[in-house]
Structures are given as C-alpha cells and as structure tokens.
Image (tube, grey):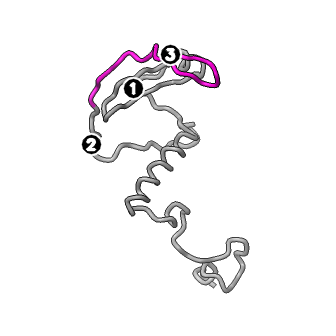
Amino acid sequence: MRQIAPALVCAGGKAKSLEHEERDLESLAFEHEGQSYTIAQMMNETHVDGLLLLQDGKIVFERYRGEMTPTSLHLLQSVSKTLTASLAGVLIEQGRLVQHLLDMRSGTAFDETDYEDEDSESYSTRPR
C-alpha cells in the first residue's frame, strides 16, 4: 500500500503520554451470540493485530499479535473512516467543523449533473 499511496500522517505537536495501569485481562470472559469467549480467544480467533483498552485515561490493557508492536505501522482502511467520523462528531458538537468541509466543497452551489450549464457558478469561474 505504501508504494501506491506513500503518504505518512504524523502527529501534530507533542503527543501526550498515557499512564499505564496494566491489568491482565486476557482471561476476562464475555458473551457473544450465546458463546463465551476470553479476550485472548477473541484476539486469536478474529486475527486481531493489536488491542489497547483505556479506562479513566489510563492504559489498562495493551497486547499485540504476530509481527505487530506498539510502533508498527498498520493499514487501517475502514477503521480510519470510523475514527475520522468520531473526531468529526466531536468537532461538530464543539462548533469547530461545518458540513461543507465534510462534503469537501467550498459552499459553491452548482449542479454536478451538468458541467456544461452556463448558468452554474462552476461554469462562470472557468475561462471562456
């Protein structure tokens, strides 16, 4: 993927370190669709590469499988959309993000179904 899209996103400014209050949660059991699983079983059976759990702003569980480490680069794909949407929700609630930024448009009103419409704002901005 890096050869196709060689972009690297870096943290802006200094990242805040999180405190560790590690607990052994691998044997913690939970129910899913009538079956009982431990966190370790879930990670192995669903091929989870890494899992980090926070409680009260502290890391209580951090485990990696396979070749993953805390500093490994990981292709997130759809998870990226979820994280972006969550961040957007927080920024919208704070009044710091507006819809036209999410739509990736500048607020120009034009009909995208007809780029040859001479009455649209987009047409009038092009050299004639």
Q: Identify the image quadrant of residue 8.
A: top left
Under mark 1, the amino acid is Pro
Query: Who's the residue at 49% across and 63% down the image?
Result: 101
| Mark 3 surroundings: few (<14), some (14-19) or many (≥20) residues within 10 A | some
Under mark 3, the amino acid is Ala
Q: Nearer the viewer, residue 123 or 111?
A: 111
Badge 1 or badge 3: first in the primary sequence = 3
Query: Where's residue 39, x and y in %?
Result: 50, 19
- Residue where numbered disc 3 is placed: 40
Badge 1 or badge 2: first in the primary sequence = 2
- Residue where numbered disc 1 is placed: 70
Checking the image for residue 14, the label placed there is: 2
Residue closest to the far front:
34
How far apart marks 1 and 3 lie (CA) works out to 18 Å
For the residue labelled by badge 3, is the local secondary structure a helix, a strand or a loop? helix
Query: Where's residue 56, x and y in %?
Result: 31, 34
- Tell whether position 26 is magenta: yes
Tell me which segment is drawn in magenta: 19-37
Query: Where's residue 18, x and y in %?
Result: 29, 33
- Tell whether position 76 is magenta: no
Front of the two marks 1 and 3: 3
Badge 2 or badge 3: first in the primary sequence = 2
Above/below status of 127 relative to 35 = below
Q: Is residue 112 left or right of residue 4?
A: right
Above/below status of 65 relative to 119 = above
Q: Is residue 58 left or right of residue 78?
A: left
Q: Is residue 74 left or right of residue 78?
A: left
Query: Who's the residue at 27% across and 39% down the image?
Result: 16
Under mark 2, the amino acid is Lys
| Mark 2 surroundings: few (<14), some (14-19) or many (≥20) residues within 10 A | few
